[in-house]
Image: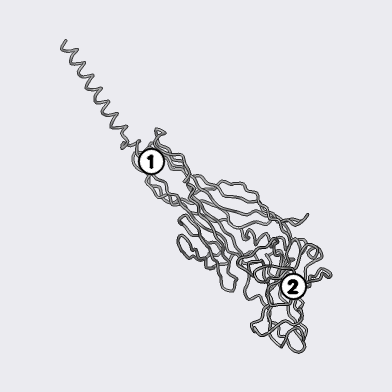
Amino acid sequence: MKMQKLIRNGVYALLGCMIAFGTTSCHKDGPYWNEAPTVTTVYNISGSVAAMNGKGIQNATVVLSGTENATVKTDANGYFLFSNVKTGDYTIKVSAEGKVSRETTVKVINNGKGQNVVWNVMLPNIEAEKEIKVTNQGGEGAVVTEALEGNEKAEIDVEVNVDSDDLNKNATIKISPIYDESEAAVSRAVTKTMMVGAKLSCSDSSVRIEKPIEITFNVDEVTTAEVKAQKYVNGNWVDVPCRMENGKVIVEADSFTSYGLFAGINFTSSTRHEALKFGQNVWDNINGTRPMTVGETTYTYKVGMDIQSQGTTVFTALLIEALAREFGANSYTTQGKYPVNMDLPMGYYLELAGDQEINSVKATVGSRSVSGTQYGDVTITHKLINRNHTGGSNRPI
């Protein structure tokens, strides 16, 4: 009897130890029941700054203002990056020596996902203007518009001819190319897209145009059939008298303002998503014996746009320029950084995944169209589980 009692007491003691051990091991502060760690949600704004020839502009100044403010410089490819920004509304302004500045607005949204908002922009030259001295014998001059490298048919000769009695007095006037409606007005209401344009100006406010000055855009007959000539007046683009002759549009300029050839371009885009490639995207501490330090990882993505079409005519070449101004140019592959920066507890597994918007874009007028592939925003998510498949999460960051 004593032996049986001793055995029974021993079993109870052992069972008590096992229960105590199990309770300790399964406590939420034990090695596999830690509270789910927090994975950082990171928001970036990046993009590409290119010249009108499609080549990246190095050392351009990019200013971010809004929820927070910052300034960066572009690298040799024209790439810029604002890392780890806060959610909110932002204005981005880009400037470079000898170039016309550009700006846009972007929104960084807290939708539970890491984001890299991408903006691509092209900057025309400031100094691409021609001074024309008008004397008693009149005056003339010309400028050539800029175009993407390999798209030379879009380089348009813009000529100005001034008769001696067109102005109220002798003066020096200027002609300079413009490339879209925004160069004439910050806010505007237009239903068509500028194919090519020019600004006629004079620094002497006492100079008046007494008779219309002829501005000639040397395009082609396809272009003359598709475009409408307009001028910028009091915040609006309005029709201006012109005539079409042998592939030329001759505009009658009656004031110092901007003039352009507009076409009803239909821009379309369809989006697919392509998986990102990470330097490392999996950290497995399921069977670990101590916390695992997880630092910064990298991923590869593309910036800019690849154009698939060839400018076989002046008109299709101008369509390509319009497509590039709308969606960007200067495509290249770059590397993003994602700072996870955490200690992954024992019993946990972390996996990152991400994708980039790949947009098939097209510019169409009637039966004519050009196309390209534009590289858009990046999204990053994470999967976090623990050894017992509870207490963790499977949600985007």
Tally of numbered discs:
2
Q: Badge 1: how crowded within 10 Å, few (<14), some, or many (20+)? A: some
**Residue 252 appears left or right of 7:** right
Height in image: 178 above or below 21?
A: below
Residue 215 figure quarter:
bottom right
Q: Can you tell which mark lies on residue 335? A: none
**Residue 80 appears left or right of 225:** left
Residue 156 percent location from the top left of the image? 74, 70
- Quadrant holding the N terminus: top left
Residue at the disc numbered 1: 36
Marks 2 and 1, Cα distance to the nearest angstrom?
65 Å
Residue 3 percent location from the top left of the image? 17, 13
Determine the secondary structure under disc 1: loop
Residue at the disc numbered 2: 157
Residue 286 figure quarter:
top left
Front one among 101 and 52: 101
Front one among 153 and 41: 41
Residue 14 percent location from the top left of the image? 24, 22
Height in image: 59 above or below 383?
A: below
**Residue 326 appears left or right of 368:** left
Front one among 209 and 342: 209
Q: How is the image coloured?
A: one colour
Determine the secondary structure under disc 2: strand
Question: Label 1 near label 2: C-beta < 8 Å?
Answer: no
Residue 328 percent location from the top left of the image? 62, 60
Name the kind of residue labelled 2 in the image. Asp
The mark that comes first in sequence, 2 or 1, is 1
Q: Badge 2: how crowded within 10 Å, few (<14), some, or many (20+)? A: some
